Structures are given as C-alpha cells and as structure tokens.
Image (cartoon, helix red, strand yellow):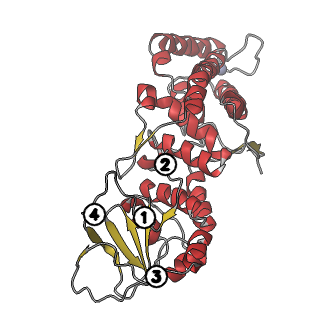
C-alpha cells in the first residue's frame, strides 16, 4: 500500500541536499477555478478549488482550514494558464497522486458522486474515492463506493437462485475482475469491510502466478496483497478446487440405484458415465475455483449437454445447489476471515 501517513503538509518535502530550484508547478486543466479559495498541490500539479465543500464533508480539511493561514502562499512559481490574476489563497500540499486527487475532487463538483448515484464509475475512481475518502474522513463517499463494489462482491446468497443463476455474473465490469481484486482486498482491509473479502480473495485465487505481480493503478503505483492475504489464497485454493470437483463427482452419481423416479435409468447412467469420462480426461484441467458460484457455469457443464431424464436433471440440479450452498457457507472459514452477516437468504 502507498505510504500516506501524513495526510496534509504545509511545507514542501525538501529533497536532501537543499534544493534551491524547486520544480515548477503546473495548474491542473480540470480543477483551476479563478475564484477558487484553496490551492491543493499534488506532486507538481496545483488544483485551485473551493474550500467550502471540502470543509463541509471532510473533518480533516475542516480542521486544517480552521487553523490560521500563512499571510502569503506564493511559495513556488506556477506555469500560467491564461491570466494569472487570482487573489492569493491558502496552499496545501497533499501526498496523493494528481490522478487520485482529480477523482476525489470530482466527487465535490455539481453532478459529482458524493450525493449522486454510482452508475458505472471506472475502478480507478472508486479506488481513489475509498482511499482518499478514508484518509480525509469523507464517510459518505467511502460508503457509497463500497456499496458499488458490493454489487459484484455480495455477502448473501439467495436461496431462490436457480442452478444457472450463480451470484458471480458474466456481465461484471472488466475492471472489477482479475487483478483489480487485489486492490479490492486492500480497500476492504483499509476500511474494515470484511464482507468484501471472501469473494475478492476467491477472485484473487484465479490469478495464478499473476497474483504476485499485483495491481497497477492509473498513476503507476503497484499494489500487492499483504503477505497474510497471499497466504490465505495459497492455503484456500486447493480446498476450493476440491470442493468443485466433489460437486461434479456427486452429480455423476445421479441416479442412485434405488432411485425409482428415473424414467430411463440405463440411458441416464450412460450419459453420466460419459460425462464423467469427459471430466476425467479434460474437464478436471479447467476447473475454476469459483465455478459453483458462476452464472450459468454448472448448468452448462453438467446438465445441458447431457441427455438426462427430467427427474435426473432435477436431481442433478439439487446436488449442485446443495454444493453451492456448502461452498458459500464455507468461504469465510476457508479464507480465515470473520464476516458479520455472511449468509444464505431464504427463498421468498
Ligand atoms: Zn434419469
């Protein structure tokens, strides 16, 4: 994680030895309001914004701006954009990257996200809202952003779901999948949102060797899983895969010898024997750890393709649902995380 121990600083961090020629500053092209009342400086970019909204929503900014301000704040030359006739105003150095700060400030402009709906934000924005929102104590922005992630990483599994309606949807945005899950685990850790962890860690388990490469943010910063979470993934992956294989094997045991409901036991047995053979030959190589939760996955692999009678089809679906529930209930334990409210929701 980024070292952001000091949220705000009045003084420029001076490189050693003494630097008499500080880098020139550029005005941000998006956030430079001539009548702004506060200049934030991130790296070598100046953002001239209004202090009111920041002070209203962020106790950190409110406290800082309540302090007496230095009489003059023309501490470094700026590269002008148009006329440079803005009245002096407080300048505050922040340790955030300019791209993170830009996302954060967008939440405070009319039509921004602090009070509005989060329809389809990019992950870079969501990540910045949570990290900077946490740092500057903008609780509402953090909570709204976490709720957005919970759409794709829920903590409840509806019992009313059919076998093909897994909670992990195919149409999840690309930028909440794959290596982004590393960042989601870290955001969950940062904010104590343990409910995001089981599915985010499950997603991390699919990264293969890439799990150690981490997630690269827009500003080039690379995030890695904490070694403890990396260990959780290594420890859980094998157990998760075995649970998926076990579900398949139980499906192949339909119909039982004493099952009188099967309409054509010979044909059904033959179909499942063939499917088991296929699974043994090729299927076992592409078992995915989240297969039991994936939308349409199990239906496609175990039922749709094989000619089972209606009774056996129903029995196979029951087996899959049963294993899906067991898998879901076991997730927090397999990843060794405590989650309040991790549950199945009974069918209505
Ligand atoms: Zn049958």
Q: Secondary structure at mark 4?
A: loop
Q: Are marks 3 and 4 in contact (CB under 8 Å)?
A: no
Work out whether residue 322 or residue 302 is closer to the camera in this orientation and state it.
Answer: 322
Local crowd size for mark 1, using a 10 Å CA cut-off: few (<14), some (14–19), many (≥20): many
Mark 1 or 4, closer to the camera: 4
Earlier sequence position, callout 3 versus callout 1: 3
Earlier sequence position, callout 3 versus callout 4: 4
Q: Does mark 4 have its CB less than 8 Å from ligand 1?
A: no
Residue 33 position, x and y percent, is: 36, 83
Which residue is tagged 2?
3
Residue 276 position, x and y percent, is: 54, 13
Earlier sequence position, callout 1 versus callout 4: 4
Residue 318 seen in the figure: no
Q: Secondary structure at mark 2?
A: loop
Mark 3 or 4, closer to the camera: 4
Which residue is tagged 1?
101
Q: CA distance from mark 1 to mark 2?
A: 15 Å
State whether residue 314 is above or below residue 22: above
Residue 54 position, x and y percent, is: 53, 76
Which residue is tagged 3?
50
């Amino acid at each position: 994680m980024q070292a952001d121990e000091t949220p705000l600083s009045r003084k420029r961090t001076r490189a050693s030895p003494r630097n008499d020629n500080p880098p020139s500053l550029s005005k941000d092209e998006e956030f430079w309001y001539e009548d702004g009342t506060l200049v934030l400086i991130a790296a070598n970019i100046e953002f001239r914004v209004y202090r009111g909204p920041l002070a209203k929503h962020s106790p950190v900014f409110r406290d800082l701006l309540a302090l007496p301000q230095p009489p003059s704040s023309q501490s470094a030359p700026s590269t002008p954009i148009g006329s440079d006739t803005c009245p002096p105003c407080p300048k505050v150095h922040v340790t955030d990257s300019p791209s993170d700060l830009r996302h954060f400030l967008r939440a405070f402009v009319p039509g921004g996200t602090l009070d509005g709906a989060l329809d389809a934000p990019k992950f870079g924005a969501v990540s910045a809202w949570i990290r900077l929102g946490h740092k500057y104590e903008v609780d509402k922005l953090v909570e709204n952003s976490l709720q957005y992630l919970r759409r794709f990483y829920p903590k409840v599994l509806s019992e009313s779901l059919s076998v093909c309606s897994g909670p992990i949807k195919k149409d999840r945005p690309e930028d909440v999948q794959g290596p982004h899950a590393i960042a989601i685990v870290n955001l969950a850790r940062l904010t104590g949102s343990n409910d995001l962890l089981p599915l985010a860690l499950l997603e991390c388990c699919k990264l293969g060797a890439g799990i150690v490469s981490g997630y690269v943010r827009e500003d080039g910063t690379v995030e890695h899983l904490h070694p403890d979470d990396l260990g959780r993934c290594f420890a859980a992956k094998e157990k998760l895969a075995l649970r998926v294989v076990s579900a398949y094997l139980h499906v192949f045991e339909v119909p039982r010898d004493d099952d009188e409901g099967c309409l054509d036991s010979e044909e059904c047995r033959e179909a499942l024997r063939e499917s088991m053979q296929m699974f043994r030959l090729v299927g076992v190589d592409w078992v995915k750890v989240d297969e039991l939760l994936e939308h349409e996955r199990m239906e496609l692999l175990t039922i749709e393709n094989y000619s089972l009678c209606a009774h056996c089809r129903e029995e196979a679906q029951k087996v899959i649902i049963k294993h899906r529930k067991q898998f879901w209930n076991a997730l927090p334990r397999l990843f060794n995380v405590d989650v309040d409210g991790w549950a199945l929701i009974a069918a209505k």
